[in-house]
Amino acid sequence: MNEKQRLESKQIEAANSSDKKSAKDYSKYFEQVITAPSLKDAKKRGKEEVKYHNDFSIPEEFRGMGEGRKFYIRTYGCQMNEHDTEVMAGIFLALGYEPTDKTEDANVILLNTCAIRENAENKVFGELGHLKHLKLEKPDLLIGVCGCMSQEESVVNKILKTYNQVDMIFGTHNIHRLPNILHEAYMSKEMVVEVWSKEGDVIENLPKVRRGNIKAWVNIMYGCDKFCTYCIVPFTRGKERSRRPEEIIQEVRHLAAQGYQEVTLLGQNVNAYGKDLEDINYGLGNLMDELRKIDIPRIRFTTSHPRDFDDHLIEVLAKGGNLMDHIHLPVQSGSTDVLKIMARKYTREQYLELVRKIKAAIPNVALTTDIIVGYPNETDEQFEETLSLYREVGYELAYTFIYSPREGTPAAKMQDNVPMEVKKERLQRLNALVNEQSAEAMKKYKGQIVEVLVEGESKNNPDVLAGYTSRSKLVNFAAPKSAIGKIVKVRITDAKTWSLNGEMVEELEPVEVK
Ligand code: SAH
Ligand code: SF4
Ligand code: F3S
């Protein structure tokens, strides 16, 4: 063993012990790696092929790193982040860490962050402020920031400058590097920053610990190439990369065999699935057509971009069965002019035509959407067009947002003549309509019998169970706890704005609402 190897093995020994100070003494022998993000690089879309890896394993020297240590992960943002947290939890367990749901008990705390709007980011900075006290009490605690905010230069610079309680920052493309990053953080006196801005790879065999055993997330693709002018996601998640269909099918089959009742396929733009698979002509329609044959009661997908929603997919969804009759189809605005500036690449008329086709093929479909109000220079008339489109489509629910400028995106450079007061007032008016239509949609269920996948106790009342219908309606009802994890029939007795109340019925065929 030469000197370098001896020192390295000492570092490993020290890293594996809970004595962080002695670990740090050896840090000078390690070269500090700082790979900072670059929005400019993240914007590039190269032609290089996607590489698929199936060789993830925990390096021998890191095994047992987590013995006697606990981890805590707080997740912000979308389902993609929720699922990444499941993967990171899987890696922590493989390293020997134990989970905890209390920050005070944790030896490592990760904030898996979201960058979609300014207030999402503010929440994270607020949380880092709280964690500073914990770090002062427990200097050996490791605090990490990962997820979409880590991909932003401005965020990393701000953390480097003012949040020295943070020990490590790593990006959305570096999740599989968690063991190495933790190792370096134990060794180093400096903040460890490892954020790759460009990524063309798909790593297949990462461990995961799924939250619960009823519903599961399955990634079908990563990244986004749409570059809507307001959106940071193409910068934080890299280029579109589809997983191979056989990998997805195998994962869903495996989940079915384990008794999962519902799978949600994930991607920022699932309708672009398969476009990058050069050797096969295969899209989301083909994939859904395969998945519907698997013996699992419910399959959903999110999120759809209207532009790539093709006729084949509609045809397949119309076959029903385990393909759920709820489609989330973000429209963003009802004005063709605003859609153009947003670079959504469809007009109001094209969107309405797509809705018409979907409704013709799936008559009972529930449609929900995302809407941004107060886009730079949005006029009252353009906003009114959003309201009229909302009525015309008859959405059952929407997530509504005030436009938030994101540094590096084209919209952030636009002059904006709409005062915040006006934007807030528009949001209120839109939300009033959203509530009205949601309540109307709920009312139709009164007296009907629906199938509910029971997820557990109701959040507000542990004596009552809660679950969702095929069309994603929340139902609260009294039933024995043995119903949890099953699909049961429930008669709806009362409809509220956001949920339904009911009672479980036995041996009745479900009658879906027309
Ligand atoms: N890939 C999905 C959207 C993911 S982000 C899609 O294209 O449908 C979720 C929602 O956040 C978007 O649909 C949009 O309504 C909203 N959003 C994204 N960027 C935003 C911004 N800069 N300000 C306000 N809302 C934004
Ligand atoms: Fe953002 Fe548009 Fe991509 Fe959705 S499709 S993630 S809104 S750039
Ligand atoms: Fe947020 Fe990143 Fe998802 S920005 S919405 S966590 S892809």
Image: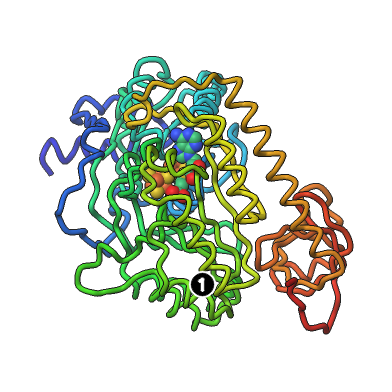
Q: Residue at x 52, y 41 (%)?
A: 75
The image's colour scheme reads: rainbow
Q: Nearer the viewer, residue 75 or 94?
A: 75
Label 1 CB less than 8 angstroms from ligand 3: no
Query: What percent of the width, then of the height, locates residue 21?
Result: 37, 25
**As displayed, is residue 150 above or below residue 353?**
above
Q: Is residue 346 above or below residue 246?
A: above
Return the residue at label 1: 255
- Residue 33 horizontal/vertical position (percent): 22, 32
Say which element carries label 1.
helix
> Mark 1 is on which residue type?
Leu
* Residue 379 percent location from the top left of the image: 51, 29
Residue 470 lies, with reference to residue 509, above or below; the image says: above
Q: Give the camera-side residue of 138 and 219.
A: 219
Res 201 → quadrant: bottom left
Quarter holding the C terminus is bottom right
